[in-house]
Amino acid sequence: LPGWAGATCELLHGGLSNQTWLLEKDGRRAVLKIDDEPREPPLNTREHEAIIQTAAADVGLASGVLFAADGLYLTDYAEGDVWSAASVADDNNLELLADVLRRVHTLPCTGREFGALLAAERYADAIDADDALVALCISLIEAIGSPRRRRLCHNDLVAENILAAPAIRLLDWEYACDNDPLFDLATVVEHDGLDERQAAHFLDAYFDGDGERHLGALREQRRLYRALLWLWLAARPETTEQDLQHAAGRLTTSCS
């Protein structure tokens, strides 16, 4: 890696499909990701991810990219506190995040659409049981179809990918590409368990008080995320039965 010969290396935890290392040299720190296997859609190539993350970094929404190649990704180390589900549940934080998402959704589109159905089918291939639930998820995703509005979206906006530093920055742009912007809001609502009041507050903050007329569109994206979430959990051997059953129960629960 150019400029990093002789750096100290510390293995970090948390990477699902890569090893993650903290590098330090001459007082500067960086994060290196080494992929376990070649990347396939819906993941970005590392080169495409670098283009998107650099655009976000240029407007203060992400850390800078230092090096990107097949199987390798090096970025500046981002100082700050990673959010938790409790952080997401705070109304003031939801308002700050809504403003961040409006800025993300004005970044240049990539010309590549988020492949929800492709992701679902890849997850389904790794699931050995629950054929009925797999079929339900696939049918829900097929029914929703391609996004009617397309903006650049993060597409993986779980609490662990949100950093307060002190302004909010987003981590892990691996899935970022063009999608319905409400998918990002739906991910926040569903993954971190916001209630209906919080969801409405978040939507209002995003649309400057005019969220109510977008509730139906948000419900649709929430259903899409619920289906993807169950498939993702079911495809992971480390998922607990309790988490899987909770996600399964939400599949048949209507969003208010």
Image (cartoon, grey):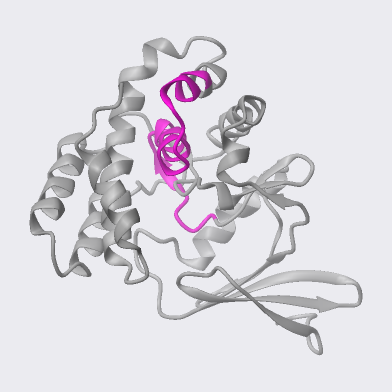
Magenta region includes residue 77: no
Magenta region includes residue 190: yes
Pick the front one: 59 or 207:
207
Pick the front one: 70 or 116:
116
Residue stretch rendered in magenta on the structure: 173-201
Q: Position of residue 23 (x, y in %)?
A: 75, 77
Point 26% across, 52% down: residue: 245
Pick the front one: 242 or 84:
242
On screen, residue 160 above or below 206: below
Note whether residue 170 is visible: yes
Q: Is residue 30 left or right of residue 219?
A: right
* Image quarter in which the C terminus is found: top left
Q: Which residue occupies the extreme bottom position in the image?
A: 6
On screen, residue 1 above or below 137: below
Note whether residue 228 is visible: no
Q: Which residue occupies the extreme front position in the image?
A: 242
Q: Is residue 58 left or right of residue 179?
A: right
Point 44% across, 28% down: residue: 195
Q: Is residue 163 left or right of residue 147?
A: right
Q: Position of residue 45 (x, y in %)?
A: 46, 66
Q: Quadrant of residue 90?
A: top right
Q: Position of residue 56 (x, y in %)?
A: 64, 46
Point 34% across, 54% down: residue: 243
Q: Which residue occupies the extreme right position in the image?
A: 26
* Image quarter in which the N terminus is found: bottom right
Question: How many numbered callouts?
Answer: 0
On screen, residue 37 above or below 253: below
